Image (spheres, rainbow, N blue to C red):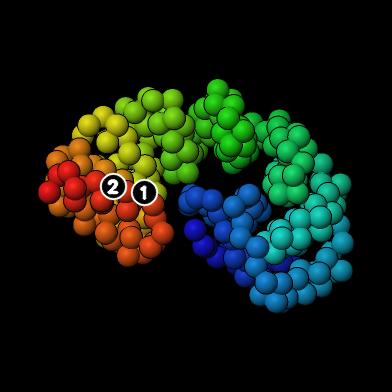
Amino acid sequence: MKFYNIVVLKKSYIIIVLIFFISSCTNNKSITEFTSNNIPRNINVYEDNFRSITTAIEREPTNPKLYNLRGIEYAKIGLFEHSIQDFRKAIKLDPKYYQAIYNEGQSQLRIGDSKKAIDNFNLSIEIFPNYSKAYFSKGLYYKDNKDYELALSNFDSSIKHDQNNADAYHHRGTLYQFLKEQNNALQDFDKSISLKRNNYISLYSRALSYTALKRYNSAVDDLNQVLHSKPDFLNALFARAKVYEHMEEYRLALKDYEKIISIDKNNRHAKKFSSFIKRKKL
């Protein structure tokens, strides 16, 4: 999700427009953090920001917030080693600056130092125990590394400290799906959808839980909404085709498989199932 913040820097009177790319999906007014889902961009896009922040640092060399802001800019274009240097300068100036500690952890994740990243997330929580973002980032890490118990615990903590975190509900829902706790998954997807507009990913995921529970009409309703906004979303087309097969609506299933093949001519699964329907069901 893209959003903009304007920061007025005292003394320098510089207005810096910062563009953040957040994971998920959460409404966040903070200008002090970035997440592991930031999208690297061409450095030319940020030249003005770098110049403005660096000028401000020259005027206020003991202001930790300025180093944190420049670190965020480095991270957004994929210069993570440079971002780590600036985050560490911010932390040296303010050892309790938990957002900068968290940000360094995100950059450490990007360069592959997961141990240092988790240490940073833990330290940021030690300083600010209600830090939902740090719990969420830990949850994502443990989920990706298949430590589901720790992932669930951290998603629980993230939601406890920020009950409007749509991403946390979504990812906990997908974890419940994996654990085959479909009713719990549905509750989390419901919440994620209620918190975020146009949340087609959670709609798609909820449809999978409905399918697992054999609530096929509800699954189709969700998938129809997804495909209305994302008509070429192959996973949703495939999921709806399989639901139609369960409902014995073979012509509708075939139509979805043929749509998949029109988008991806080499899709073996769609070809296989469309051929089966033509031979056996029609």
Pick the front one: 79 or 65? 79
- From the image, tell me which residue sits under label 1: 269
Query: How far apart are the two marked residues, 2 and 1, measured between alpha carbons?
Result: 6 Å
Q: Is residue 159 left or right of residue 262?
A: right
- Label 1 near label 2: C-beta < 8 Å? yes
Q: Is residue 169 above or below residue 21?
A: above
Picture coordinates of residue 252 (x, y %)?
17, 52
Between 209 and 72, which is closer to the camera in this rendering? 209
Q: Position of residue 33 (x, y in %)?
A: 65, 51
Q: What residue type is disc 2 on?
A: Phe
Crowding at mark 1 (Cα within 10 Å: few <14, some 14-19, many 20+): few
Query: Which disc number belongs to residue 87?
Result: none
Q: On residue 273, which mark appears?
A: 2
Relative depth, front residue between 136 and 281: 281
Residue at the extreme front of the image, as rendered: 279
User: Residue drawn at (71%, 60%), measured in percent from left and top?
Assistant: 78
Which residue is painted at 21% across and 57% down in the image? 255
